[in-house]
Image (cartoon, rainbow, N blue to C red):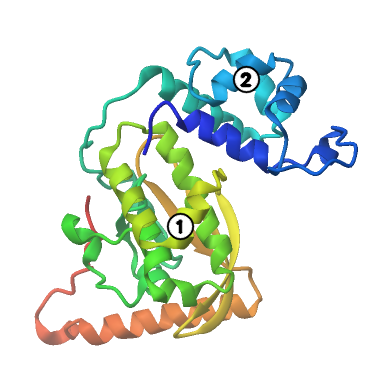
Amino acid sequence: MYGKTQLGNFLQARRSQLHPEELGVPTYGERRRVPGLRREELALLAGVSASYYTRLEQGQSLSASTEVLDAIAGALRLDESERRYLHDLARVDRQRPRGRRPAPERVTPAMRQLLDVLGDVPAIVLGRRTDVLAWNRLGHALFAGHLDPGAPEKPAQRPNMARLVFLDCHFRDLYADWPAKARAVVGNLRLVAAQHPEDAALHALLGELCANSEEFASMWADHRVKACAVAAYEMRHPQVGPLTVIQQTLSSGPGPSAVVATTQAGTPSRVALTLLAQAVGHDTAQADPPTGSGQARLRPRVGTG
């Protein structure tokens, strides 16, 4: 799925998504056989020769300088995330990494402490391939109450958020604007794939999703890149009804990241989340032995990596 053509595929896809009139490129009323800018038009906007740009897009040149890539990024109107992605693809083409299966991802002690602190806030810990490495009780209840709460503790059975979003009907019903959530997942996976081209497990996941979801395959072919650290989503929870949450990704660099969901104070969404927390606490209290039974009440262990 990855190789020297990825940069060319991205350039061609983004070029086709630009409208000449938006960039001040005259068309003289002519009918075009293909959408978007022509190669020579983009080359002119970027200040490079048409022949050089053509070779770059066709994967025949692997030596584009940082200055040339920045010029092309400017012509394509790329944002900062897309610009970094463009440079990552060029680096991948030059290095031609060999696929390998990296070591399993694990929950760090610091991330485990964060989950403990966020006891009243839904939180999940995701690996770079969106594997669920851990979640707290409320995170499990909000996002995946239909799944085994102990699943993240079992490496062979860990849920994968990208797989759930595209292949699990619960998630289609959970998000009122499911396409927006799906596009965010795909856009983030594109960034990760360019940053970790050697990750064979990631490429296997992408191949599986392309084979089993026409929607994923279509979004992946669109070459949209999206760094989504903060986003608002309207959810339709089966237990507490509609609520709007702000999902924020907390990360301190390489390694797993935590996704937390918060609601605005004084809103029906905050009430719904409070009701969900009470339901989770009630279910847990019923499952725990009575305090007077002589047995210690153990706090359930958060899933490890």
Q: Do the residues labelled 1 and 2 touch (CB within 8 Å)?
A: no
For residue 143, which numbered disc appears in the image? none
Q: 188 and 6: which one is in front?
A: 6
Secondary element at image label 2: helix
For label 1, count other residues whose C-alpha is less than 10 Å away and answer few (under 14), some (14-19) or many (20+).
many
Instruction: From the image, tell me which residue sits under label 1.
Output: 216
Tell me which residue sits at (35%, 57%) in the image: 211
For label 2, count other residues whose C-alpha is less than 10 Å away and answer few (under 14), some (14-19) or many (20+).
many
State how far apart marks 1 and 2 are (Cα): 29 Å
Tell me which residue sits at (63%, 38%) in the image: 14
- Drawn side of residue 210 relative to residue 30, left or right: left
Compared to residue 227, the image places residue 119 above or below, namely below
The amino acid type of the residue labelled 2 equals Tyr
Secondary element at image label 1: helix
Residue 263 pos. (x, y %):
58, 68
Instruction: From the image, tell me which residue sits under label 2.
Output: 53
Residue located farthest toward the right when viewing the structure as drawn:
28
The amino acid type of the residue labelled 1 equals Phe
Among the 4 quarters of the image, the one containing residue 133: bottom left
Tell me which residue sits at (20%, 37%) in the image: 103
* First reached walking from the N terminus: tag 1 or tag 2: 2
Residue 9 pos. (x, y %):
52, 35
Residue 171 pos. (x, y %):
44, 71
Tell me, yes or no, if residue 115 can be seen here: no
